[in-house]
């Protein structure tokens, strides 16, 4: 009897282990994505739980004030910007017609979001909502559970809607003469239609226009389930209908869900990881998912509406992408595309050039959105994206045109932040003196192209432009433009003009060449330090010489001094209470001392120890910063995830390497989170990272091999991996301070020689 019991116990245990093993094997990359990660911000803009397919035109997320918002403002139909700008709104409703409004607020519960699906229960309305999304069309299944007539109200915040031929169609006005169109139909024919205003329902009225233009359709009393499908377009209503017909043929959500899940697993499955914790996998795949939110492909059957020209264009077989905030995305997002989606990256850069050709001036865009180039932030980092792609072997764009567009943006457009005006007095000074002059505290601004709030940002602009001019020199060299190369390479050293030899900070100068005094490297510059820097203070801009890090080390007096300055940043106190610090520097979040993990200029900084003979400190910092600031929870992102670059930083860093200098075809080695990772390169080859003995404690590299050869360098080139290969690391609990420390093994700066 005891043997039988023992037999059954053993059998049960084995069965349980098999089931657990099978369940784990069945978990796919999309199952690790948590769209709620970071939905509560530390201070400024949170992430949004976005439902979309990779880089698709149609994106939605729940319409509420923020994650903790108690009410949904109807159901979303399209998001036109990841910052919370939506078009159209659908309100399912059961009740007296007197309760109808253009947008109905709903109490809700049981919400569940995946990248390709949405479910929510409108509890007071007793309505079940299910949603499936495609690239330019989507479908709702709405289950009504009350014994009252069911209605649907479609709202356009500012536009026109009409009911005709069994469908609602119309548009909503966006900015810059841009419209988004909709074509929506249901599987059940309504028996009543009308126009909804704030005061009443106008039965049998079939069109509405203006603010909160709203059409209602009502169904027979025995209807308790309705399917709603719709297409969207930036071209016209007819194209919206065609987009719907192409992508969603029927009213069944399941095939749309299945295809969406397949598309996401294909995109996320380009990188596979093993080892690490479940939370680390969630952080990784959620971050990778975020990199596919932008830019968006807006080609529709070979055409697209261009807000850059105000006309509909043929894409000539090359998909057109926009909504790409390049000041952010050049740092890590575009380099990640080059590895796993090089064809898409070529199309994006081709789109940049098309935008430049379509605008009034042939200038490379800086912040191209659905509604055109908003010219936000500072510098012209599109040239870095072009250079990085070219030196890594991408050829699907016209380099000569890209050079001319970049040259125009840097030499003809003003360098003043947040401005698309022609070059003026500020730019003439930069041309002659090699830096942007700063104003003393209280000195009045007189230059018209300077934004009243963003101010001059003279140090940030000088450093950023020096990097852009280095990129231009490298592109000119590729094209054989000797004169342009000589001109821009000389100007790429302009950062030196603001380096303070005594303090080792980049310090603003006035128009007489004198350093601004008195000066506080934490707090001078007003709101966001914009009087001198940009969103971050001097401690972060101390390292913003990505193209010539070795020269920065030399300026600071060598490796020892450089390391001391790096260490000081991580230990320097805020100097004020949190309330006072963040009141002035709300973007400077994710602090470790004066380091700001929550803002883009910080991303390359932890890797700079590699350049000064102490790679072990890079390994320590990366393996500390990621779990500190990127977590599987509602506050798990330390700052604004503007354009995918913050998430791409996480992806690279968890894999174990990072592109410190876009434009140099090489990567710095950090410390991987996983014991194994494989990257499906877009050319069909595979690059593997193997970390033997890896664990939370074993974060330090003891030894390394690259493609089977002992490797003593804390970096490797793009050519080392592009045809496939393997980086093997042996990890340990305590630092091997000798590995990668010799001067001859330091990463290259300025060029690959």
Image (spheres, grey):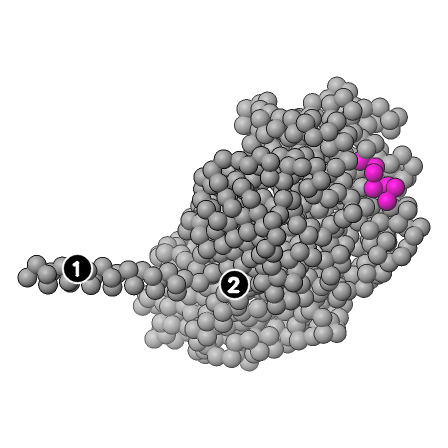
Residue at 75% x, 43% y is 749
**Residue 450: x %, y % from top left:** 80, 39
**Residue 200: x %, y % from top left:** 49, 62
Q: Is the magenta stretch mostly helix, strand or loop?
A: helix
| Image quarter hosting the N terminus | bottom left
Q: Is 440 or 564 nearer to us in this picture?
A: 564
- Sequence order check, earlier mark of 2 and 1: 1
Question: Does residue 750 show up?
Answer: yes
Question: Does residue 351 show up?
Answer: no
Residue bearing mark 2: 269
Q: Is 567 or 452 nearer to us in this picture?
A: 567
Give the number of the mark in front: 2 or 1.
Answer: 1
Residue at 42% x, 49% y is 277
Q: Residue 9 carries which label?
A: 1
In the rendered structure, does residue 677 fall within the stretch colored magenta?
no
- Place residue 310 in its image quadrant: bottom right
In this picture, which residue range is highlighted in magenta?
Answer: 489-495
- Would residue 121 be found to the left or right of residue 246 on screen? left
Residue at 75% x, 34% y is 552
Residue at 69% x, 57% y is 719
**Alpha carbon separation for disc pair 2 and 1:** 38 Å
């Amino acid at each position: 009897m005891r043997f039988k019991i023992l037999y059954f116990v053993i059998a049960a245990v084995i069965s349980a282990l098999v089931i657990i093993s099978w369940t784990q094997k069945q978990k796919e990359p999309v199952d690790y994505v948590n769209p709620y990660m970071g939905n509560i911000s530390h201070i400024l803009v949170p992430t949004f739980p976005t439902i979309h397919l990779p880089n698709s035109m149609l994106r939605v997320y729940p319409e509420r004030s923020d994650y903790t918002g108690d009410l949904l403002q109807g159901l979303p139909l399209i998001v036109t910007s990841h910052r919370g700008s939506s078009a159209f709104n659908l309100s399912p409703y059961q009740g007296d017609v007197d309760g109808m409004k253009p947008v109905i607020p709903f109490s809700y519960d049981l919400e569940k979001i995946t990248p390709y699906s949405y479910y929510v229960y409108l509890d007071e309305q007793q309505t079940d909502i299910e949603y499936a999304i495609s690239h330019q069309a989507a479908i709702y299944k709405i289950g009504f559970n009350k014994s009252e007539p069911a209605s649907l109200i479609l709202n356009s915040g500012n536009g026109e809607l009409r009911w005709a031929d069994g469908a609602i169609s119309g548009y909503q006005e966006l900015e810059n003469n841009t419209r988004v169109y909709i074509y929506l139909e249901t599987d059940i024919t309504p028996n009543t239609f009308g126009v909804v205003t704030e005061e009443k329902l106008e039965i049998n009225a079939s069109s509405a226009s203006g603010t909160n233009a709203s059409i209602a359709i009502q169904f027979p009393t025995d209807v308790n389930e309705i399917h709603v499908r719709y297409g969207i377009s930036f071209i016209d209503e007819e194209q919206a209908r065609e987009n719907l017909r192409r992508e969603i043929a029927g009213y069944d959500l399941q095939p749309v869900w299945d295809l969406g899940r397949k598309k996401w697993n294909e995109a996320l499955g380009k990188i596979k990881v093993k080892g690490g914790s479940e939370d680390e996998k969630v952080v990784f795949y959620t971050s990778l998912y975020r990199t596919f939110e932008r830019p968006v492909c807006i080609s529709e059957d070979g055409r697209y509406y261009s807000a850059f020209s105000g006309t509909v264009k043929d894409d000539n077989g090359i998909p057109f992408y926009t909504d790409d905030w390049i000041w952010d995305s050049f740092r890590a997002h575009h380099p990640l595309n080059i590895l796993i989606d090089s064809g898409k990256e070529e199309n994006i850069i081709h789109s940049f050039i098309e935008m430049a050709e379509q605008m009034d001036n042939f200038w490379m865009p800086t912040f191209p959105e659905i509604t055109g180039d908003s010219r936000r932030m500072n510098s012209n980092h599109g040239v870095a994206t072009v250079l990085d792609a070219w030196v890594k072997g991408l050829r699907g764009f016209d380099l000569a045109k890209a050079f001319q567009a970049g040259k125009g943006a840097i030499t003809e457009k003003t360098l003043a932040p947040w401005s698309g005006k022609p070059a003026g007095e500020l730019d003439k000074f930069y041309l002659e003196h090699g830096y942007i002059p700063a104003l003393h505290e209280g000195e009045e601004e007189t230059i018209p192209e300077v934004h009243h709030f963003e101010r001059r940002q003279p140090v940030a602009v000088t450093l950023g432009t020096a990097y852009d001019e280095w990129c231009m020199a490298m592109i000119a060299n590729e094209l054989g433009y000797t004169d342009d190369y000589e001109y821009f390479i000389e100007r790429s050293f302009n950062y030196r003009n603001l380096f303070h030899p005594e303090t080792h900070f980049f310090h603003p100068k006035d128009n007489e060449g004198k350093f601004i005094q008195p000066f506080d490297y934490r707090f001078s510059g007003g709101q966001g330090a914009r009087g001198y820097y940009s969103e971050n203070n001097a401690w972060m801009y101390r390292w913003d010489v990505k193209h010539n890090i070795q020269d920065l080390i030399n300026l600071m007096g060598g490796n020892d001094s450089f390391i001391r300055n790096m260490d000081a940043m991580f230990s320097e106190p805020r100097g004020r209470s949190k309330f006072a610090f963040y009141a002035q520097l709300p973007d400077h979040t994710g602090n470790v001392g004066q380091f700001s993990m929550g803002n883009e200029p910080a991303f390359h900084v932890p890797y700079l120890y590699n350049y000064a003979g102490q790679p072990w400190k890079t390994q320590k910092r990366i393996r500390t910063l990621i779990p500190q600031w990127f977590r599987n929870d509602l506050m798990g992102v330390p700052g604004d995830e503007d354009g995918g670059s913050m998430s791409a930083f996480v992806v690279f860093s968890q894999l174990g390497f990072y592109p410190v200098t876009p434009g140099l075809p090489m990567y710095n080695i950090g410390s991987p989170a996983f014991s194994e990772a494989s990257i499906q390169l877009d050319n069909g080859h595979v690059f593997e990272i193997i970390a033997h003995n890896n664990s939370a404690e074993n974060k330090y590299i003891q030894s390394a091999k690259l493609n089977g050869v002992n490797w003593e360098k804390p970096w490797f080139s793009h050519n080392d991996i592009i045809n496939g290969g393997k980086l093997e690391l042996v990890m340990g609990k305590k630092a091997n301070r000798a590995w990668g420390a010799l001067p001859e093994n330091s990463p290259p700066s300025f060029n690959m020689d």
